[in-house]
Image (cartoon, rainbow, N blue to C red):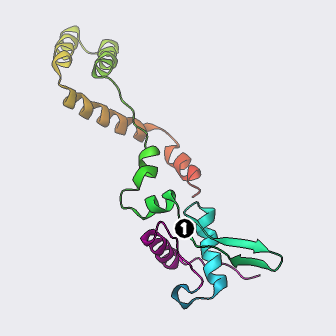
Amino acid sequence: MSKLMRDAALQRRMLLAMNEDLLEGVWMEEFDGLSERTIMENLSYLEQHGLCESGIAHDMSGPLLAECSRITAAGQDYLSEDGGLTHELRTMTVRIHPDTVKILLGKQIDESDLPEEKKDRLRKHLSKLPDKALQAVVSAGLEGLLGQVPGLLDALRTSIGL
């Protein structure tokens, strides 16, 4: 049994070739003058990740390239610089209404140890704060909060398998 030599450059060239002929697909059997086995191993790897339909079929004698190879939507998105729809669909957007931010900040002001006159002045300025300024406050607060969460980096490393 041979060990798959992962060849990212070859896999990218394969995807690019498939992307060039979306409707017809690509016959990979003579791709780059490589052996059929090397081609099938790399196509199989791409297919396992959902980036293409390999065209590999299996019969009694083993695997064979029976059909054209075709790139999938995920493969096209993988090739695109912006990640395509795959990136858009996996993006999490959190929207917080400015009034909600003002209420939360007002609560922090109320619970603070500041003298009452400073609290009043802060509340007055908070009520007039434009949305863009609130966005900056929320971003800075989130950044500070994430920096204070113990084990956050370890959790991130674990979730991505490092």
Residue 2 pos. (x, y %): 72, 82
Rate crowding at label 1 as few (under 14), some (14 to 19) or many (20 or more) other CA atoms within 10 Å: many
Residue 114 located left or right of residue 128:
right
Q: Answer whether residue 17 is magenta in the image.
A: yes
Q: Answer whether residue 76 is magenta in the image.
A: no
Task: Please tell me whether residue 109 is drawn above or below residue 149 in the rendered image.
Answer: above
Residue 87 pos. (x, y %): 43, 50
Residue 74 pos. (x, y %): 50, 57
For residue 108, what is the image quadrant?
top left
The three-letter code of the residue at mark 1 reads: Arg
Residue 14 pos. (x, y %): 50, 75
Residue 102 located left or right of residue 156:
left
Q: Which residues are magenta?
A: 1-29
Q: Quadrant of the N terminus?
A: bottom right
Q: Which of 161 and 30 lies nearest the eye of the viewer?
A: 30
Task: Please tell me whether residue 125 is drawn above or below residue 57 in the rendered image.
Answer: above
Q: Quadrant of the C terminus?
A: bottom right
Q: Residue at x 34, y 14 (%)?
A: 107
Furthest toward the bottom, the residue is 33
Q: Which of 121 and 158 lies nearest the eye of the viewer?
A: 158
For residue 83, what is the image quadrant?
bottom left
Q: Residue at x 51, y 79 (%)?
A: 10
Residue 77 located left or right of residue 129:
right
Q: Residue at x 47, y 77 (%)?
A: 13
Task: Please tell me whether residue 37 is drawn above or below residue 21 in the rendered image.
Answer: below
Task: Please tell me whether residue 2 is drawn above or below residue 145 in the rendered image.
Answer: below
Q: Which of 154 and 117 lies nearest the eye of the viewer?
A: 154
According to the picture, the residue beneath numbered tag 1 turns out to be: 70
Residue 24 located left or right of residue 146:
right
For residue 161, what is the image quadrant?
bottom right
Furthest toward the front, the residue is 24
